[in-house]
Image: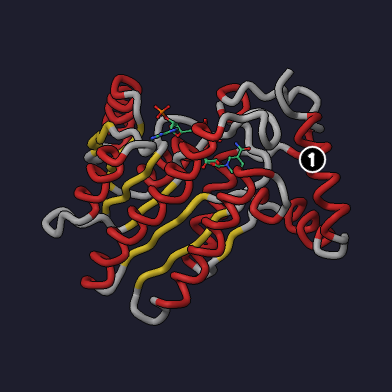
């Protein structure tokens, strides 16, 4: 049986990956900080699908947390076939409104953890000649907007570059760049997303279906939904200065109340 490890598996997009992969017959390793919530989810998935779901409590903003997950990914006796680096969060406010310490925490979770976990998983997968890694970035990767967008741009560039470097050896890496998805993300960040037009919201289960389809097709970049594909296409035609201004205005609009 195949095994998937998902970080940030207890809510939003990560929980949608867990449900979808459980339905698809995967055993699961669920990673997040809240142990009680992890166990609740693991028990529910086990009872519904009969799979083996284990939990790994880890804070990916810490060295110990990242090391614990690296160790699990390096376990050659219990190999992980699919890694989903999904854990992440937003910071409210623009540049200099957010304390540098919180920006650094974001870089730790979005960049350092993704680099280390991707590397631990990919090394082991290359030995077996098969496996997959999905790194959850964002459409924010394509817009000049603060540390969040910059960290997601790093995830996207890193993943596509690494995918090219290991191409033809049985291991697929893909960056997933969704637009706005209804999850706990905005509330956790204290963002006011009430005014976001309805058409901009994506459904987490659909995002996951598209991501898995794109990975199976060998894509290294997945932008779920034609609306966001069109938005990205149009943004390439707009001068960078205009894009930065529009992006910053959006940040103010959907920023802290
Ligand atoms: N929602 C959107 O509109 C959107 C759009 C594009 C991209 N994304 C990206 O999608 C990913 C998932 O976001 P989401 O919207 O599903 O968010 P969410 O509903 O807030 O879920 C976040 C998950 O990450 C875990 N997590 C957060 N910080 C962690 C840490 N330091 N260590 C370990 N686990 C941690 C949380 O569990 P614990 O709190 O228990 O740790 C939770 O399971 C993120 O990378 C986000 O940047 C989201």
Q: Is residue 184 above or below residue 60?
A: above
- Closer to us: 26 or 91: 91
Horizontal side of residue 78 vs 53, given as left or right: left
- Badge 1 crowding class, 10 Å Cα cut-off, few under 14, some 14 to 19, many 20 or more, is some
Count of numbered circles on the image: 1
Horizontal side of residue 94 vs 55, given as left or right: right
- Residue 120 placement (x, y as % from top left): 28, 59
- Who's the residue at 47% across and 66% down the image? 216
- Who's the residue at 66% across and 33% down the image? 96
- Who's the residue at 75% across and 35% down the image? 251
Quarter of the image where one finds residue 115: bottom left
- Residue 118 placement (x, y as % from top left): 36, 58
- Residue 224 placement (x, y as % from top left): 64, 53
**Please, what secondary structure does the residue beneath circle 1 have?**
helix
- Closer to us: 170 or 34: 34
Query: Which residue lies under the disc numbered 1?
Result: 248
- Residue 165 placement (x, y as % from top left): 42, 77
Q: Is residue 159 above or below residue 181?
A: below
- Who's the residue at 36% across and 70% down the image? 171
**Which quadrant, please, contains the N terminus?**
bottom left
Horizontal side of residue 172 vs 185, given as left or right: left
- Closer to us: 92 or 32: 92
């Amino acid at each position: 049986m195949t095994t998937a490890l998902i970080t940030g598996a207890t809510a939003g997009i990560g929980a949608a990956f867990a449900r979808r992969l459980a339905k698809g017959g995967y055993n699961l390793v669920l990673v997040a900080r809240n142990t009680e919530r992890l166990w609740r989810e693991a028990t529910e998935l086990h009872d519904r699908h009969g799979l083996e779901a284990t939990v790994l409590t880890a804070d990916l903003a810490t060295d110990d947390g990242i090391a614990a997950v690296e160790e699990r990914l390096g376990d050659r006796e219990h190999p992980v076939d699919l890694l989903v680096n999904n854990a992440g969060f937003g910071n409210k406010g623009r540049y200099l409104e957010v304390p540098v310490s919180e920006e650094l925490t974001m870089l730790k979770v979005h960049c350092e953890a993704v680099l280390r976990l991707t590397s631990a998983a990919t090394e082991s997968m290359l030995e077996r000649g098969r496996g997959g890694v999905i790194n959850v970035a964002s459409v924010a990767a394509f817009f000049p907007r603060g540390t969040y967008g910059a960290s997601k741009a790093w995830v996207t560039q890193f993943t596509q570059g690494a995918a090219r470097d290991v191409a033809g050896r049985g291991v697929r890496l893909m960056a997933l760049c969704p637009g706005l998805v209804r999850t706990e993300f905005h509330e956790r960040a204290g963002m006011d997303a009430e005014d976001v037009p309805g058409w901009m919201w994506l459904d987490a289960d659909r995002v996951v279906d598209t991501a898995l389809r794109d990975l199976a097709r060998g894509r290294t970049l997945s932008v779920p939904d034609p609306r966001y594909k069109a938005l990205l296409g149009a943004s390439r035609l707009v001068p960078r200065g205009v894009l930065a201004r529009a992006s910053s205005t959006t940040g103010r609009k959907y920023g802290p109340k």
